[in-house]
Image (cartoon, rainbow, N blue to C red):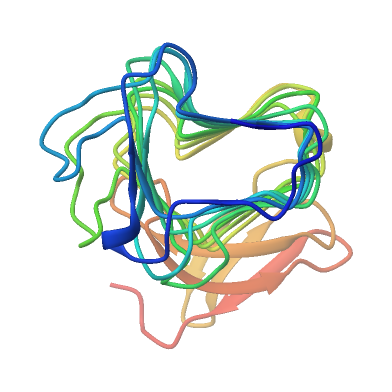
Amino acid sequence: MILNGATGNRIGGVSSTEKNIIVSSQASGIYISGSGGNIVGANNIGRNFDFSSSLPNATNGIEIINSPNTAIGNSLALNYVESGSQIAILINDSPQASIINTKVGGAPFSSGIRFRNDCSQSKVGDGTEDGRNYIVTNGSGVFVEATSGNIEINSNWFNQDENGLPAGLLSRLHHIHLAGSGNTILNNRIAQDQEHGIFIESGSQNNLMSQNSIWGNGLNGIEIGDAAQGNISPPSIISITTSGFQGTSDPSATIELFADRDDEGQLYVATTTADATGNWLIPYDHTPV
């Protein structure tokens, strides 16, 4: 527990031999409140040293409240956080938090990572292989509440293990659930969810999603609620010719083309921009079969 303005502390190390084993607490495993600039390094939270037994803490794995610039994880040793009955990592009113190289697990219907209130400029993943998070939960993977927003979720693997193989746990809720606005979702693998891969609630606006690999989910790869994203219209392919893929969209929209046998978007192909009337073309150098 870190409270009352204590800064510059580190919980956990930078190697597997320096990990803390934080299990079976009657509350959260790590609790930081009113204290910015602290580091939660490599730990086993909710699991024993060799990961063979689940020993969850009663509520959250890590709970951060009113503590800006909190760093969770490091690039040198995998951090492991499992939730108790609630959330693996709760970031509440704590801007500029960062979460990297962390394997996130959780109890049924709990969230892996949840942002509440002002957590602007926080990041889940940093766009590098060493900073990738592995988010394997039975509930929501990352949930941005309506009171929060301006979160970047970059280059994480949802329901994939460290070798890129299916983790074997089908999430019962959306991998990424956006209720707040202004979020950026980039270059993530989002796979094998019973619900939508990404769900954007009504009222959530100005979210950017680009070059995510999405496949094998029970419903849609991306589901946009009524009145979300400014009521943007999904692009349509109207023809495939020797010139390429031709389609329509909202005027001046950015269009990304994906290939996927399940119509979700597993393999990114190319990007273009629609003209002022909403027409677009992505060249294709093969004759259609």
Question: x, y percentage for residue 253?
Answer: 78, 59
Residue 90 shows up from this direction = yes
Residue furthest out toward the right: 276
Q: Where residue 186 sits: x, y (%)?
A: 58, 59
- The quarter of the displayed image where residue 14 is located: bottom left
Q: Residue at x 45, y 29 (%)?
A: 61
Judging depth in this view, the residue of 89 and 226 nearest the camera is: 89
Comparing 176 with 248, the one in front is: 176
For the point 47% across and 82% down, the residue is 284
Is residue 95 positioned above or below 277 on the image?
above
Q: Quadrant of the N terminus?
A: top right
Residue 79, position in %: x, y?
38, 51
Image-based side of 85 in relation to 279, left or right: left
Q: Is residue 131 above or below residue 193?
A: below
Report the quarter where the C terminus lies: bottom left
Q: Position of residue 287 (x, y in %)?
A: 36, 82
Q: Residue at x 41, y 46 (%)?
A: 264
| Residue that protrudes farthest toward the left in the picture | 52
Q: Residue 165 or 216: which is nearer the viewer?
A: 165
- All told, the count of numbered labels is 0
Residue in view at x 25 percent, y 59 percent: 162
Horizontal side of residue 86 vs 276, given as left or right: left
Quarter occupied by residue 283: bottom right
Q: Residue furthest bottom?
A: 285
Residue 190, visible in the rendered structure = no
Q: Nearer the viewer, residue 119 or 164?
A: 119
